[in-house]
Amino acid sequence: MGGVRLPSPRGAFRVWQRNATIFRKYWKTILLPNLFEPLLYLVALGLGLGAFIREGGINGLTYTQYIAPGLLASNAMFAASFESTFNTFIRLKIGRIYDAIVSTPVNAEDVVAGEYLWAGTRAALYGTAFLGVLTALGLVSEAPLISSPWALLIPPVLLVVGIMFSVMGTLFTSLISSIDFYAYYFTLVVTPLFLFSGIFFPIEDFPSPVPEIAWFTPLYHAVNVCRALATGPSLGVLVDIAWILVFTAALSLLPIRFMRKRLIS
């Protein structure tokens, strides 16, 4: 694609390693807010609104059981989105960290790939911590929030989901000139995905074309996978996994192309 080469695993790992080294110094203060926010949604909506959900819940699940896996997916989305937008922009335009990195044997393609991997790692870390909380809450309730051994596969799924949203966030970052433009991204992209991807209610109950539109959005499939793994998957989840992988692969080279132009200009 216009002279853009594939990233080298070694170079991408060095970028990931740099971010991980810095994260280790501040992980406690960074992790807690990302743990409390989905927990607040779980308590406020799961216990509050859930009290008004008719007996039998949604698809045989209590309302708290229904929204808990979806909040895992949304937690990964928010973690990767913030990392690939605000944090990436600061390293690109304010701190000029990438300018220093590309003056070494690590090139622009490696930088973007390393950031993909790092954002995915953060998403997996936050999601795994929240998964631990959900598991602990299930131990003290009559209806466990996570009821399937397949839930052990959720952390690697969150890694892939985080990479997917990192690709989206990095693509937007590669096209904007001011940090103020992120208000549009989070208001017009992230928030609608959070509300209309099946986290809090079945999208299938909406009139057409809402379900059809939702099917083409990334968080919808991430929610489906997390919910299936938490409650017991069916073969249909393979379609959601395939959608995530194809979407991520198809989009991943665009941010690399645009970021390379910005870094070498």
Image (spheres, rainbow, N blue to C red):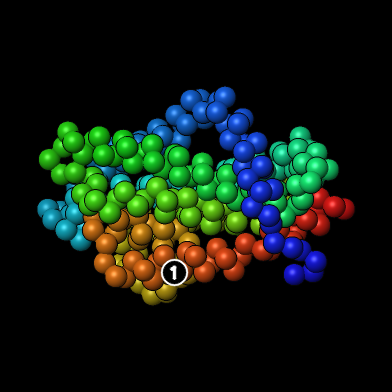
Relative to 57, residue 208 above or below: below
The quarter of the rendered structure image containing the N terminus is bottom right
Q: Which residue is drawn at 80% across and 66% down?
A: 3
Q: Which residue is drawn at 58% across and 35% down?
A: 20
* Foreground pick, 22 / 71: 22
Judge the density around disc 1: few (<14), some (14-19), many (≥20) Cα neighbours within 10 Å: few
Relative to 33, residue 177 above or below: below
Which SS class for mark 1? helix
Horizontal and vertical percent position of residue 165: 54, 54
Horizontal and vertical percent position of residue 80: 54, 47
* Residue 217 can be seen, yes or no: no
Left-right relation of 67 to 147: right
Horizontal and vertical percent position of residue 147: 21, 49
Left-right relation of 251 to 206: right
* Foreground pick, 220 / 159: 159
Left-right relation of 149 to 20: left
User: Of the residues shown, which amino acid type is indicated by label 1?
Assistant: Ala
Left-right relation of 202 to 62: right
Q: Residue at x 75, y 59 (%)?
A: 258
The quadrant holding residue 260 is: bottom right
Horizontal and vertical percent position of residue 193: 47, 56
The quadrant holding residue 86 is: top right
Disc 1: which residue: 242
Q: Which residue is drawn at 64% across and 52% down?
A: 9
